[in-house]
Image (cartoon, rainbow, N blue to C red):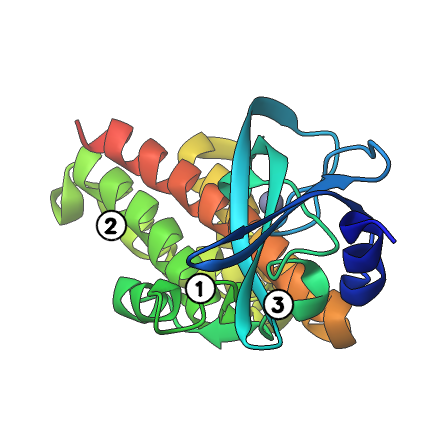
Amino acid sequence: MRVTTALNRMLKLPGALVKDVAFGGEGVVVTVGLRARRRSACSGCGARGLLIKERREKSWRHLDLGASRCYIECRLRRLYCPGCGDVYEAVPCSPTSRRTRSPPCRIDMSAGYEKAIRAPEGLPNAQVCFDPFHVCQLGGKAADQVRRAEYNRHGRSCTGEGKWIKGTRYSLLKNTANQTPKQLAKLADVVLTNESMYRAFLLLGELLRQTRRRQRARGSAEARDARVCSQEIVAGCKLVGRSSQALAT
Ligand SMILES: [Zn+2]
């Protein structure tokens, strides 16, 4: 029996065939080729149809073969994923494949938490989801920032319009279902007279709706959706933040 055939039987690597075997001082290096050229998929989130940047040899440690260490070597495509950045394509036999990934971690939005999880000694392959409570809180802050920028631009409390803008806070931030008729009337005036604040109100409403909708999802879909949702929300907040900055200058 050829040694490659023997290793194919021993290793049983899903989706890959042993092409070559080398026995060196550090252990056994098994070069594999992927069986079928499937459409590339992100090893982080599974997104498909991504841009291929380059191809690179990649090796990772496999289970030991008796007393020898075993390394798998494979030529993989490097992809650009809008959600995960530069990543290798997903390979069923690699340790970063979705089957062996760590469970999703839900954290608050501080950079320190994410850094700790991403560290090599943490859970570098884990999906990070932001806690919806903090995401919504950030959205509310961003919308209020737009209102304050408008307040400053209209002469603050020295003018009638400034005073009026100051009083629109709850109309912009509070769930419309819980607003008093007076607050709703004020909101209608915002819609008609102030485009920036109206836009902030719409974005915030969309963020809250998306978060509530995704929170109702269950199981693994929940983790994936929460991740997508957090990206949408952060993008939305950046938009609101940008418009408030533009108004402030
Ligand atoms: Zn991805």
* Label 3 vs 1, first from the N-terminus: 3
Which is nearer the eye, 107 or 214?
107
- Residue position marked by numbered label 1 in the rendering: 124
**Ligand 1 has an atom within 8 Å of the beta carbon of the residue at disc 2:** no
Rounded to the nearest angstrom, the CA distance separating label 2 from label 3 is 54 Å
On screen, residue 174 above or below 193? below
Q: Residue at x 27, y 27 (%)?
A: 246
For the point 62% across and 34% down, the residue is 75
Please name the residue that numbered disc 2 is placed on.
163
Mark toward the start of the polypeptide (2 vs 3): 3
Frontmost residue, 3 versus 41: 3
Q: Amino acid at mark 3?
A: Arg
Say the numbered circle drawn on residue 70.
none
Q: Name the residue rendered at 35%, 32% in the picture.
A: 243
* Number of numbered discs: 3
Q: Check if mark 2's residue and mark 3's residue have beta carbons within 8 Å.
A: no
Direction from residue 163 to residue 83 in the image, left or right:
right
Q: Nearer the viewer, mark 2 or mark 3?
A: 3
Q: CA distance from mark 2 to mark 1?
A: 50 Å
Rounded to the nearest angstrom, the CA distance separating label 3 from label 1 is 9 Å
Q: Quadrant of ligand 1?
A: top right
Q: Which mark is residue 101?
A: 3
| SS label for mark 3 | loop
- What type is the residue that disc 1 sits on? Pro
SS assignment at label 2: helix
Where the N terminus falls, by quadrant?
bottom right
Frontmost of labels 2 and 1 is 1
Question: Residue 175 vs residue 116: left or right?
Answer: right
Could you tell me which quadrant the C terminus lies in?
A: top left
- Residue 107 quadrant: bottom left
Mark sitting earlier along the chain (2/1): 1
